[in-house]
Image: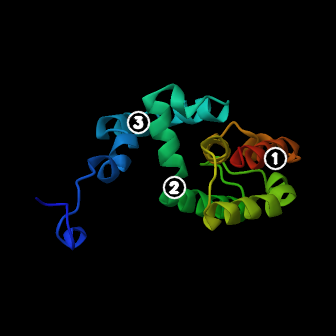
Amino acid sequence: MLGHGVGAANTYSPARPWLDCTQALFEPRLLTRLRARLRRLELDHALAEGAEPSDSPLLAARAAQLVSPGARHRLATALERLVLTGDAPASHWQVTPRPYAMDANRQRLLDLSATLRRGGLLYARGIAILELVLIDGTGPAYTDARGEGLARQLKLAVASLGG
């Protein structure tokens, strides 16, 4: 009989499917991941406002997308570009960040970029807040002439990244 006797450990390995499929059990299905990508703005707002990723499969899928290494690297690069864009001349054809808001928050933006690149556990809420800093043309990065509103939003992001 396999699995018993001397040397059996070398000839037989019991099947433990729960160890092999653990990742698959927790990974959202492809359709759910696609729907989360299509509704990312709505889901990012919900996560930034404190919605629990475990409340719905779509929130969980979006949270998983946000905390992935690729998304974190992309966001870090985008934050660095945001700082540089604040130095560029204003354009009549696109919304650009407010130069003073960028100057006033330059170091905090660069620190956040480094935090995203460093790895380790970060929470989706903080990353969602940073996503919105970048893409919300009506947000403080683009409308706050003095940079105080952006500073508050970045401070919230820092606190939310840690849980």
> Which residue corresponds to mark 3?
38
Where residue 123 appears, as percent x and y from the top left, is 63, 46
Q: Report the disc number at residue 45.
A: none
Which quadrant, please, contains the N terminus? bottom left
Q: Amino acid at mark 1?
A: Lys
Q: Earlier in the sequence, mark 2 or mark 3?
A: 3
Which quadrant, please, contains the C terminus? top right
Instruction: Give the residue at the far top of this rendering.
Output: 55
> Which residue corresponds to mark 1?
155
Q: Are marks 1 and 3 in contact (CB under 8 Å)?
A: no
Is any atom of residue 86 visible in this view?
A: no
Alpha carbon separation for disc pair 2 and 3? 15 Å
Q: Amino acid at mark 2?
A: Ala
Alpha carbon separation for disc pair 1 and 3? 28 Å
| 2 vs 3, front mark | 2
Q: Nearer the viewer, residue 136 or 156?
A: 156
Q: How many neighbours does mark 2 have within 10 angstroms: few (below 14), some (14-19), or many (20 or more)?
A: some
Where residue 63 appears, as percent x and y from the top left, is 52, 41
Q: Nearer the viewer, residue 58 or 153?
A: 58
Where residue 135 appears, as percent x and y from the top left, is 60, 44
**Which element is circle 2 on?**
helix
**Which element is circle 3 on?**
helix
| Left/right of residue 2 with respect to residue 101 in the rendered view | left
Q: Residue at x 48, y 39 (%)?
A: 62
Q: Report the disc number at residue 71.
A: 2
Is any atom of residue 36 visible in this view?
A: yes
Q: Residue at x 69, y 36 (%)?
A: 138
Q: How many neighbours does mark 1 have within 10 angstroms: few (below 14), some (14-19), or many (20 or more)?
A: few
**Which element is circle 1 on?**
helix
| 1 vs 3, front mark | 1
